[in-house]
Amino acid sequence: MTVHQSTDNSSGVKRTVRNTLFALVAMVGFTIALVPLYDVFCEITGLNGKTADSAQVISATGVDTSRTVRVQLVTRSAPGLPWRLEAINQVVTVHPGEVAQARFRFTNTSDQRLSGRAVPSVSPSQGARHFRKMQCFCFQEQWLAGGESLELPLVFQVDPALPDDVATLTLAYTLYPMGEEIALGGLHD
């Protein structure tokens, strides 16, 4: 092997290593950016039933009294949080454009102060773009002392632009543990 071939092999190896590292950094960057991009895409399109995570402006187009929309409220608690979340009003019937309210009860069944956050989704997914929350407990983390119960409102509006063929929307909240118990790797029963 000549000196010239050794130098060519060495520069080829360096180029391959450099290109491989560049590709690895690009893949990691893309992976990190994918989750926020997906969330934005879902919020804009209503895909996966994602709804806005902050208060929205009421539609001023008026109330469509010629039709009603049935809003079913479903709740569940994820494993790891000894809380109950229940919709006091399990079904609310509204005219598109009118502002409505539903109430929910949170109960901490443990003897410890814990926090949780309710994450909403709407189905059918095309309805997510037309479901506006003006006030919602889901906008922030909730804290409850052991054995404490709390009732909180949801103030919402179904946009009159909701397609006519959608007569029922299902708003599902899943309650997840937050705060210190997450840092500790979840709650232990």
Image (cartoon, helix red, strand yellow):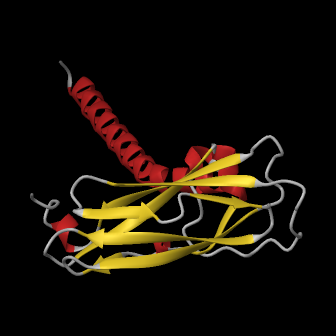
x, y percent for residue 55: 61, 76
Q: Nearer the viewer, residue 180 or 172?
A: 172
Can you tell which quarter of the image residue 145 is in? bottom left
Relative placement, left or right, of 29 versus 182 is: right
Q: Which residue: 41% across, 53% down?
A: 32
| Residue 12 appearing in the image | yes
Quarter of the figure with the C terminus: bottom left
Quarter of the figure with the N terminus: top left
Q: How many labels, in total?
A: 0
Q: Which residue: 47% across, 77% down?
A: 152
Q: Does residue 103 lie above or below 185 as drawn?
A: below
x, y percent for residue 59: 80, 71
Relative placement, left or right, of 142 versus 50 is: left
Relative placement, left or right, of 70 versus 114 is: right
Q: Which residue: 30% across, 71% down?
A: 107
Q: Nearer the viewer, residue 82 or 50?
A: 82
Can you tell which quarter of the image residue 62 is in? bottom right
x, y percent for residue 177: 28, 64
Q: Which residue: 19% across, 73% down?
A: 180
| Residue 45 appearing in the image | no
x, y percent for residue 187: 14, 61
Can you tell which quarter of the image residue 6 is in? top left
Q: Nearer the viewer, residue 97 or 4?
A: 97
Q: Residue furthest top?
A: 1
Q: Residue furthest left?
A: 189
